[in-house]
Image: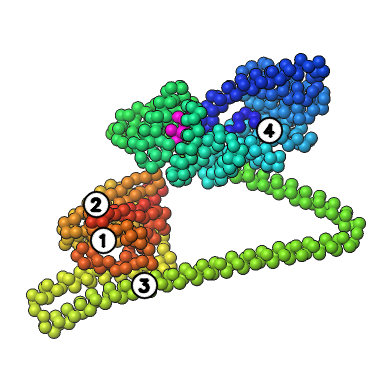
Amino acid sequence: MDYFTFLCRRIIITIIFVMCYAPILTAQEENSTRTKIEELRSNVNFTPQNPEYIDLLLKLAKSQIRSNADSTELLLKEAYQLSLDTHYRSGESIALSTYGYFYFEKGETDKAHDYNMKALKVADTYHLSNEKLKALNNMGLDYWLLGDSSSALTKFLEALTVATEVKNVDMMVSLNVNIANLYSENGDFETSLSFLEIARKLNVELGNKEILAYTLLNMASEYADLGNYKEAERMVDESLDYFLKQNTKDWISHAYEQKGSIALKQSNYEEALLWYKKSEQLCDEIDFSYGYTLLYNGIAECYLGLKNISEAENYALKGLAISTEFSIAESVKDANLILSKVAHQKGDDGLAYSYQQKYMELYEKGQVEKFRKGLGVLRSKMQFENQKKALIEEQHKAIAKQKNYAYLAGAALLVVTLTLILIYRTNKLQKKYTENLQEKQNALIMREAQLKESNKTKDKLFSIIAHDLKGPINSFHGLMKMSSDESISQEDYDELFPEALKNIQGISEMLNNLLVWARTQMKGITLKQENVDVHLIATSTLLLLIPIANKKEISIQNNIPKNTISFSDKNHLDIILRNLISNAIKFTHQKGEIILTMIEKNNELQIEITDNGVGMALETQSKLFDKKHATSTYGTHNEKGTGLGLSICKDMVESNGGSLWVSSIQNKGTTIYFTVPKATVTTVAV
């Protein structure tokens, strides 16, 4: 395969792979090829017009491109001329492709492109599939490394079609990886993974463990970007096993760095630092300069997370220096962001602003470039598909024309053919209609089941609510009647009235949740997201609930930082916090404690409400958010609840793009977690 058969997702590592391994492979290849050439020349019947001899000259020329450019040029000239003299079209096309590779290595990209175009023309003219495949792949790599992703994708897709037709599995693997990297470069990780999965399966079938290990490492990176850390870890470990057996220290270092990156994305700073340090040690051993460009920034982020500001600054400065040296814009951008945070932690806001400005400048530039490339990739794919369709249509027209000539030879054959076509079309349409009807029937059955389940849930909820309403209301009515009849003493009234009032408060909370649930069932959840201050909403909610908490002498701490901004529906957040804090009060003992905290993650805020109350058994936790299992519950002071509030909270959190879950130990306490999106832009929150 021309240039290099495998490109890692990170261009940095790709370049290092080629630099480290290509010379070894080339030296072995060169010695073997020279031996074969000498054997042919020593034969008494030797003639240079032999295709085998021409192929060996081309192979030797390619192996010497980096080590002996002058020899390469002479060998190419001889092989190309011999191919022309003998009309050996395969040699002619390969010679032109190798010229393209030769000039690409010299930095003369225009010449490289011209020779690859000539190679492609010869291959197309004489229907040489493997030679066409090499030319297309070379051109795709040319375009990609020159930053023209759209043209690169067009060539790779065309080459993949050819590779599939001729069943060239090695090239199918390389092309699938190259296409995957193009999509990954443009942020489309799911599409990238689909192509990498194809490459992985082909490698398994081919039994190529080396390329499989590289492919798995690529896939691990994509899974980590998608948040599937478990699968990412599994794939890194599988590839690491291979690299350790082969003792390929640069790839072992990269695998360790990848494990550190996965841990860092999960905020496991100590674990991440452990892997990063192992990677750094290997980089030091083999003087792996490019490896530091990713490594130093990762280590700096770990130290920042561990509050070791001096080490964070030290590694961030190292990362900035080496990334600048190698002109790697993405790493330069990340280093500036880390240094901005470090400067802010040190109280030097002027320096922090300077680093932040540089980061934003690089970020905006990167986004514009990414958008441009993304559009180019999409446009190229559409153009390729349109060209493919046009070619198929032309082929269909040609076939139809030939059929028409045949039909003129006999009317009987025409009638039979038309009849068969009509039968085929009728069967096809009938099959299509049957499938559509089946799909609609399945949808109706599913909807009917959902409605039945919804009705069961509704009946159960109303049964619970009717039961829970009846007792408190009858008690309150009886108390009022006795009071109006003056058949109750003041002492009994003073004793019974607070209990009745507490029951009425429980009814009020129950009815509020019921009204919210009923509204969502009729109209669905209405969403109006905006930038809101979570701290302010929590504070106003606590003003309403602290009087209830005071009756049980429960202390509530609001540790959510001020100006914690979320892009959420304000009313939803109010309902969520009110329900969750009310539940915490309800199930916390006298003189207990409730704490509200917030953890900032990648693109979301994680809110935690922790109490030291009664806790829950695992069985209760598993059914906590399921309306089908809603039951009446009682707090530590016999406060009533239906369990409907938690279900409403879960629906509202998810409608805002977050998730809600619970962690609890019986008789020790409970923590309810939920996430909401961060603010979209810096604006005044409400």
Q: Position of residue 360 (x, y in %)?
A: 43, 37
Q: Position of residue 617 (x, y in %)?
A: 29, 58
Which of these two is toward me, 494 or 426?
Answer: 426
Residue 408 lies in the magenta stretch: no
Residue depicted at 77% across the width and 37% down the height? 127
Label 1 sits on a secondary structure element that is helix
Query: Which amino acid type corresponds to the residue marked 2 in the rendered image?
Result: Ile
From the image, tell me which residue sits under label 2. 595
Q: Which mark is residue 134?
A: 4
Q: Is residue 530 left or right of residue 3?
A: left
Q: Are marks 4 and 2 in contact (CB under 8 Å)?
A: no
Q: Which mark is residue 460?
A: 3
C-alpha distance separating marks 3 and 4: 68 Å
Query: Which amino acid type corresponds to the residue marked 4 in the rendered image?
Result: Lys
Q: Residue furthest bottom?
A: 485
Residue 255 lies in the magenta stretch: yes
C-alpha distance separating marks 2 and 1: 13 Å
Label 3 sits on a secondary structure element that is helix
Q: Residues within 10 Å of mark 3 (few under 14, many from 20)?
A: some
From the image, tell me which residue sits under label 1. 582
Q: Which mark is residue 271?
A: none
Query: Which amino acid type corresponds to the residue marked 1 in the rendered image?
Result: Ser
Q: Quadrant of residue 92?
A: top right
- Colouring of the image: rainbow
Query: Which amino acid type corresponds to the residue marked 3 in the rendered image?
Result: Lys
**Sequence-earlier tag: 1 or 3:** 3
| The magenta segment | 250-258
C-alpha distance separating marks 4 and 2: 65 Å
In front of the other: label 4 or label 2? 4
Question: From this viewpoint, is residue 355 visible?
Answer: no
**Sequence-earlier tag: 1 or 4:** 4
